[in-house]
Amino acid sequence: MRALLRRLALTGASALLALPPAAASAASAADAASTAGCSASSAVVKKLPNGTTWQMCWRNSPTAGLILTDISYRPTYESKPIKVLSSARLAQINVPYDDGSVDYNDLTEEQLGDYALPLNAKDCPGGTLKSFLVTGDAERPHPVKGLCVTTQARGFAYHGDSSDTGEEHARTDSAQGQDLVLYTVTFAGWYHYITQWNFSDDGTITAKEGATGNLSPYDFDASDSTGWPIGNGKTGKAVSHQHNVFWRLDFASDGSSGSKVEQYDTKPDGISRQGIPRLKTTRKTVAKEFAGDSANDRWWRIVSTSGKNEDGHPRSWEIVQQHTDKYYGHGYTRHDMYFTQYKSCEKFASDNAINGSGSCQDTVDRFVNGQRLTHPVVWVNVGFHHIARDEDQTPMPVHWQGFQIVPRDVTSMSPLTPGRLHNPAHNGQPPQ
Ligand SMILES: [Cu+2]
């Protein structure tokens, strides 16, 4: 009911669905905390079983929820941590309903971060719960144990035969992978949102937003073309809607905010003499602010202008966008990626003007106005069009949407290569 009142108070409209907030505080070795640039209570430092160490600072914003800062990656063979991101956070969740009745901004209207829910030990298996302050509908701020910091198995990290790279007494090597995982659960209306970040031992970062909770009880009046029958017979049709999630990434490759953005496209390139289709990959440096769209065989990377790996290749981080249901309802939701020059008051993908300072534009599409990209901020937009199904009752099984950030040439070999293979003999073209 609290959630309903919150919706009604904010919108004056009938009820809908909502969203929740985020996380904060946590600890580890004091030296790591000082390295990370935050207090021990807001530092997370974790060495995973395969040897990779991730470290970062965290806090909870009443609006944006869980905010991670100063994220660094230290694979086994690196002598010091490699800075990846200055900041990683949500930038908006839009929830428009297909019948045009409502259109929520769950961060900026619903104050997602201020409605974090307490987690129980069973909600954080093998991990540690961290507290932070929220106010929500209470009179004053109070602590909630709302951040889980844990590790999770992710299946195979690799499986390979070393004879293929020229080892004389060959072996089959295999390992299981692990992730450092941080998440909070927040609510808006009847929806509970899981804001989660996975940091894998192979250097991959996964951002994922999970939607669970319950369908809006006030929105079972859809037509055939705007909803789906839920419950016995055909009388109640739940209104379909979009969960449109934006993330904001401020890269700091190798500790420097100076980076460039490249777009790669692979296309057919005729037929070879053997009668086999050829493919050709082209690179385009994105010099100015840019709104991008996913396409077959297209990807982007953020390239450090200062750091190189031991092979002499520039370190970079590739954005891997997964499935998205694009929402065309607003100018700012029409593109999958926005690359903008860093500006401190550009924090939210919509409703930005009233939530930052007055000197910034209101929506992310308007942040793109021709500036040269020397300190790129990446906005990733992933949509999920939710046509409800009977299985959504109850509680609704979690639906995830998100993307990944994958290291490309950050290290000269796999960060997980077994020690006996981590040498020049196994790096590059093997002996024939
Ligand atoms: Cu939904």
Image: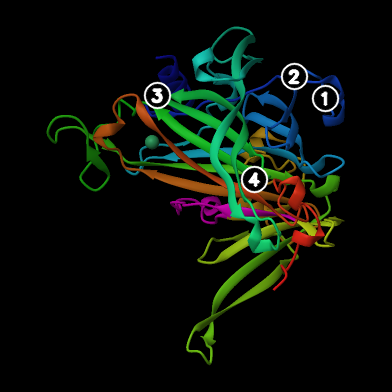
What span is colored magenta in the figure? 316-336
Binning the other alpha carbons within 10 Å of mark 4 as few (below 14), some (14 to 19) or many (20 upward) gives some
Identify the secondary structure beneath mark 4: loop
* Mark 1 element type: helix
Residue bearing mark 4 = 204
Label 3 vs 2, first from the N-terminus: 2
From the image, state whether disc 4 or disc 1 is nearer to you. 4
Q: Amino acid at mark 2?
A: Ala
Q: Is residue 171 above or below residue 15?
A: below
Callout 1: CB less than 8 Å from ligand 1: no
First of labels 1, 3 by sequence position: 1
> Residue at (76%, 53%) from the top-left corner?
410
Q: Is residue 281 above or below residue 174?
A: below
Rendering coords of residue 185 (x, y %): 52, 24
Label 2: which residue?
A: 27
Q: Compare marks 3 and 4 and give the one earlier in the sequence.
A: 3
| Amino acid type indicated by mark 1 | Ala
The CA distance from mark 2 to mark 1 is 8 Å
Give the mark toward the camera: 3 or 2: 2
Label 1 or label 3, whichever lies nearer to me, is 1
Task: Please give the residue where the numbered disc 3 appears in the rendered image.
Answer: 190
Q: Nearer the viewer, residue 405 or 106?
A: 405
Q: CA distance from mark 4 to mark 2?
A: 22 Å
**Mark 4 or 2 closer to N-term?**
2
Gap in angstroms between the C-alphas marked 3 and 4: 32 Å
Q: Amino acid at mark 4?
A: Thr
Residue carrying label 1: 33
Circles 3 and 2: CB atoms closer than 8 Å: no
What amino acid type is highlighted by mark number 3? Trp
Q: Are marks 2 and 1 in contact (CB under 8 Å)?
A: yes
Mark 4 or mark 1, earlier in chain: 1
Could you tell whether 27 is left or right of 235 in the image? right
